[in-house]
């Protein structure tokens, strides 16, 4: 069998196939093309952006044309210059409160000038390359800010929904609400209720027809349906009024107190920048989670995104548009619609320009109550229950609540400042809050330290340690990630004194550096948690530890835990002991949860039994994440009575039908002994268990020898040798075997399962993902944007 491999390598055309020229021959002038996916995505985003832009302009009190100007500029300028290819920018609901306050204080022309100055500030921040610093803001503050803005929007728009006029602040709007309810206009309420009903029910249409209809954005259906109903019923309501572009107000020189203008510029810059940068990060996650292997969409360049947003705000403010930021609703729609480049964002801006020039008569039929209901729904959605659960789980609900209440009652900048102060206070409280308890169980004294061990906790630590009698067996459990020098010295001095008086001390849990329970001069192994996977042994000879003494002076000897196993048994026992001492306290609570809830892995990971392949390490996974099947050669036998293998097939069936895994990964690796044995196998001879098992790899060998199929590649280079080529080919072949299993084929047809091929180069510690199977198997380096959730 192995004779066919050298023959294939000697093919004179092989060099041409595996080593392409550095550049292709000239093919004439390059033509600009827009992918069909970008065209369809741009239409979907445009249909969402049009009504939302008008609604946000209405909510701020700005000219309605300002929303259309911002939408067009956001698509064309930010889409072309920004660093996040698939993020869609425009007038954002998160800027509504800020812009409305600026218009009320300084007027529209000065607000446009503030937008221009904020854009210049963003350009400066982008040149200073400080974009990553904005991500240091606690998510609880950002979510609290957006929730406060959402509450402010919803309360203000409720007045327009009822047929009235909103007040300038949330308290004033709440005080005026009873009178507004007493004098509400039935026509406005009916249009608003119809808009909300369509907005809520449209995404929930059942059946196949519902799936087709849901492709039309709910926002467009809601506003269009309410507009049509109002026109057919002959309702007399305030409607969109788009004055002539010749009367459109542009930016003017800023007028007002200097300190107030500076604060306004800083507030606009802060909200625009943070929302855009966090939106860019969120778009990266959406692209990574998109089903299937997405096209080559690069990760966001945050500094370039800040520059693009600054340029867009300068242009928008100069043309009399609203401030611009990345918009989550439009960006997520762009990604889910299948956009593959920034062309979709720019094309949506072109469509907005066309609409503002040709669709004015249609836009002026839209009732203002319908737009107000749409924006009110957006404001309500900004108060996310999922965000509240997340910050509660991370014990940051106070930061979230204070920020939200501050934004609602005082303003955006003041609310964010209160949130930052609260976050700093919570961090200091966590640093200083340390619980130290002492208890005796079965003659052993346990001192448990929960929290960070700093000099502030030293008096309480000292009191707890002095409760331990002289000569007693003691366990000190450190459940924290930080210990300062004062606490370290206190604990070490007490340990030396207690040990000298005949007692024993075992220190477990988290603690920095070498274990405190072992003096630095000890010749014993000082292995940190998680190092046993390295299969390392301590350098130098291992001396036996001195025998401990009983109180009567006799040796306190224990039976050898290794038994007759010798050195290997000792390594096993020592590894188990290290796990119980160092690692178990870190994972005990998580394993207890898994024991209660059962396993719910998302992936079946099928790989080789090679000891150098540590699945949890190369996938950064933990308990409960992967359902792992390992065998010699990461083989998936074809189903069948003679050729099949019940153990692997049973694992596949259980993972797909019972555990409902969402993906299956076949992972090969470099230097695979099974592939080497397969290449070197000779016909005949004894049919050992290993040879009988390796027969399942013969289709991979035949695939590699097939002259009709090109050889695979690894990150653009040809395989180093025949063994590596067989390892790559085997991954592709085993994926074909997987598709032959009934449970896998059924799940693939239902769209509930994905198959992935992976290759791990042991010597390089580099993972490669199979990106193409038609060309014999093309493996590229794994990047975050290549992975699915």
Image (spheres, helix red, strand yellow):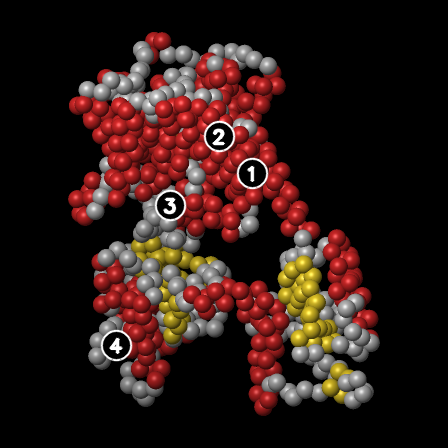
- Camera-near label (4 vs 2) is 2
The answer to the question of whether label 3 and label 1 lie on touching residues, with beta carbons closer than 8 A, is no
Give x and y (percent) for residue 101.
49, 22
**Dot 1 crowding, Cα within 10 Å, few <14, some 14–19, many 20+:** many
SS class, disc 1: helix
Which residue is located at x 65 percent, y 88 percent? 559
Which residue is located at x 20 percent, y 44 percent? 210
Which numbered disc flags the more N-terminal residue, 3 or 4? 3
Up/down of 396 relative to 60, above or below:
below
SS class, disc 4: loop
SS class, disc 3: helix
- Camera-near label (3 vs 1) is 1
Which mark, residue 402?
1
Q: CA distance from mark 2 to mark 3?
A: 22 Å
Which residue is located at x 38 percent, y 45 percent? 286
Q: CA distance from mark 3 to mark 1?
A: 33 Å
Which numbered disc flags the more N-terminal residue, 4 or 1? 1
* Residue closest to the eye, 498 or 745: 498
Q: CA distance from mark 4 to mark 2?
A: 59 Å
| Residue wearing tag 2 | 272
Q: CA distance from mark 2 to mark 1?
A: 21 Å
Q: Give the left or right position of residue 449, taking residue 77 as reference.
A: right
Which mark, residue 644?
4
| Residue wearing tag 3 | 287
Give x and y (percent) for residue 119.
50, 24
Which numbered disc flags the more N-terminal residue, 3 or 1? 3
Q: Quadrant of residue 284?
A: top left
């Amino acid at each position: 069998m192995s004779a066919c491999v050298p023959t294939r390598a000697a093919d004179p055309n092989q060099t041409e196939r595996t080593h392409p020229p550095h550049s292709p021959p000239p093919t004439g002038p390059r033509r600009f093309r827009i992918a069909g996916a970008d065209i369809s995505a741009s239409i979907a985003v445009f249909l969402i952006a049009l009504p939302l832009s008008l609604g946000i302009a209405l909510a701020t009190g700005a000219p309605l044309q300002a929303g259309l100007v911002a939408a067009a500029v956001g698509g064309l300028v930010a889409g072309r210059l920004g660093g996040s290819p698939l993020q869609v920018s425009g007038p954002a609901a998160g800027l509504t409160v800020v812009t409305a306050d600026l218009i009320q204080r300084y007027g529209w022309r000065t607000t446009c000038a503030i937008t221009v100055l904020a854009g210049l500030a963003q350009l400066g921040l982008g040149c200073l390359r400080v974009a990553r610093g904005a991500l240091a803001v606690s998510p609880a503050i950002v979510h609290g800010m957006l929730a406060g803005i959402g509450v402010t929007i919803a309360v203000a728009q409720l007045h327009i929904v009822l047929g009235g006029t909103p007040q300038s602040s949330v308290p004033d709007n709440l005080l005026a609400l009873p009178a507004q309810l007493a004098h509400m206009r039935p026509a406005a309420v009916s249009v608003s209720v119809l808009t909300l009903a369509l907005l809520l029910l449209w995404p929930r249409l059942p059946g196949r027809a519902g799936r087709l209809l849901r492709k039309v954005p709910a926002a467009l259906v809601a506003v269009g349906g309410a507009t049509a109903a109002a026109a057919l019923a002959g309702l007399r309501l305030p409607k969109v009024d788009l004055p002539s572009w010749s009367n459109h107000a542009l930016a003017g020189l800023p007028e007002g107190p200097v300190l107030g203008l500076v604060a306004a510029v800083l507030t606009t810059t802060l909200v625009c920048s943070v929302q855009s940068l966090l939106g860019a990060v969120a778009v990266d996650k959406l692209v990574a989670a998109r089903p299937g292997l997405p096209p080559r969409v690069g990760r966001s360049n945050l500094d370039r995104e800040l520059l693009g947003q600054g340029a867009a705000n300068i242009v928008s403010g100069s043309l009399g548009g609203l401030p611009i930021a990345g918009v989550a609703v439009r960006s997520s729609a762009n990604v889910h619609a299948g956009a593959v480049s920034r062309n979709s964002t720019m094309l949506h801006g072109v469509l907005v320009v066309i609409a503002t020039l040709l669709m004015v008569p249609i836009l002026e039929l839209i009732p203002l109550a319908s737009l107000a209901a749409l924006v009110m729904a957006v404001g309500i959605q900004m108060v996310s229950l999922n965000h509240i659960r997340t910050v509660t789980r991370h014990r940051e609900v106070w930061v979230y609540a204070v920020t939200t209440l501050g934004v609602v009652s005082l303003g955006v900048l003041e609310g964010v400042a209160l949130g930052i102060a609260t976050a700093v206070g919570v961090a200091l409280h966590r640093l200083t809050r340390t619980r130290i308890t002492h208890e005796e169980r079965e003659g052993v004294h346990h001192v448990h330290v929960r929290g960070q061990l700093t000099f502030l906790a030293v008096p309480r630590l000292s009191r707890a340690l002095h409760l331990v009698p002289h000569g007693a067996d003691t366990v000190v459990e450190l459940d924290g990630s930080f210990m300062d020098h004062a606490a370290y010295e206190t604990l070490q001095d007490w340990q030396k004194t207690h040990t000298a008086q005949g007692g024993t001390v075992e220190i477990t849990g988290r603690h920095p550096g070498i274990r405190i329970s072992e003096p630095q001069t000890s010749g014993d192994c000082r292995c940190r948690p998680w190092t046993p996977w390295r299969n390392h042994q301590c350098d130098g000879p291992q001396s036996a530890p001195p025998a401990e003494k009983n109180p009567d002076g006799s040796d306190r000897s224990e039976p050898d835990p290794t038994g007759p196993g010798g050195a290997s048994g000792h390594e096993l026992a020592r590894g188990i002991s290290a796990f119980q001492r160092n690692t178990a306290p870190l994972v005990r609570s998580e394993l207890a949860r898994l024991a209660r809830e059962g396993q719910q892995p998302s992936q079946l990971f099928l790989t080789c039994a090679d000891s150098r392949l540590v699945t949890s390490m190369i996938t950064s996974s933990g308990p409960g994440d992967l359902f792992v099947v390992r065998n010699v050669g990461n083989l998936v036998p074809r189903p069948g009575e003679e050729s099949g293998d019940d153990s692997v097939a049973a694992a596949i069936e259980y993972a797909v039908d019972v555990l409902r895994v969402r993906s299956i990964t076949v992972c090969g690796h470099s230097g695979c002994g099974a592939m080497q044995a397969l290449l070197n196998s000779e016909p005949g001879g004894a049919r050992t268990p290993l040879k009988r098992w390796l027969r399942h790899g013969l289709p991979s060998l035949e695939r590699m020898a097939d002259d009709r199929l090109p050889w695979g590649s690894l990150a653009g280079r040809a395989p180093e040798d025949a063994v590596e080529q067989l390892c790559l080919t085997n991954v592709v072949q085993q994926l074909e075997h997987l598709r032959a299993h009934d449970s896998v084929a059924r799940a693939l047809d239902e769209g509930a399962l994905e198959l992935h091929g992976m290759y791990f180069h042991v010597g390089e510690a580099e993972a490669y993902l199979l990106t193409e199977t038609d060309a014999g198997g093309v493996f590229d380096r794994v990047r975050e944007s290549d992975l699915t959730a």
